[in-house]
Image (tube, grey):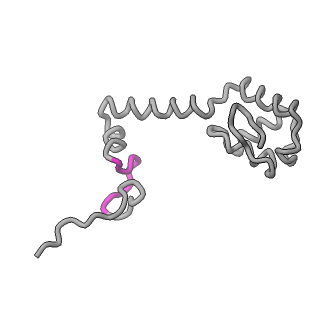
């Protein structure tokens, strides 16, 4: 497997499909990176030369794209800030409820977890 910034990306896929394995790089960003690095997007990752891998890494650094650990830290910091100032969104995050106005009477099982029956005593 090829390594870019310490992240292993699959060799058997096209480089255009392999780059999004890096957290913070999506399909559109991958296309732009390959265009600027002058690398054919249809080439397999395993067929890339060391020189081409270095070019791709340089383009990511030059564009100052936040990836992997830095991006995760940034997102975590944003959530921590919301919870510390006790705003509505922060409280919803803390309680594990939907944050963006979805209904909770039905649905929202993804956020709330497995159904817990309350009451129903005779």
Image height of 4 relative to 102, above or below: above
Q: Residue at x 35, y 50 (%)?
A: 97
Q: Residue furthest left?
A: 122
| Main secondary structure type of the part rendered in magenta | loop
**Residue 71: horizontal and vertical position, in percent?**
56, 32
Q: Pick the quarter of the image with the N terminus.
A: top right
Q: Quadrant of residue 107?
A: bottom left
Number of numbered discs visible in the structure rendering: 0
Q: Residue furthest bottom?
A: 122
Q: Residue at x 44, y 31 (%)?
A: 78
Task: Depth check: give the residue in front, 2 or 92.
Answer: 2
Say whether residue 33 is left or right of residue 23. Answer: right
Q: Quadrant of residue 120?
A: bottom left
37 drawn magenta: no
Q: Pick the quarter of the image with the C terminus.
A: bottom left
**Residue 19: horizontal and vertical position, in percent?**
73, 42
The span shown in magenta is 96-105
């Amino acid at each position: 497997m090829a390594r870019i910034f310490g992240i292993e990306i699959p060799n058997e896929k096209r480089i255009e499909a392999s780059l999004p394995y890096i957290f913070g790089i999506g399909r559109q960003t991958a296309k732009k990176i390959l265009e600027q690095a002058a690398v054919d997007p249809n080439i397999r990752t395993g067929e890339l030369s060391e020189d081409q891998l270095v070019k791709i890494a340089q383009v990511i650094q030059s564009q100052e794209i936040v990836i992997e650990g830095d991006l995760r830290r940034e997102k975590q910091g944003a959530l921590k800030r919301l919870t510390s100032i006790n705003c509505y969104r922060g409280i919803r995050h803390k309680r594990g409820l939907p944050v963006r106005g979805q209904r909770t009477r039905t649905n929202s099982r993804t956020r709330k977890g497995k159904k817990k029956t309350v009451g129903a005593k005779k």
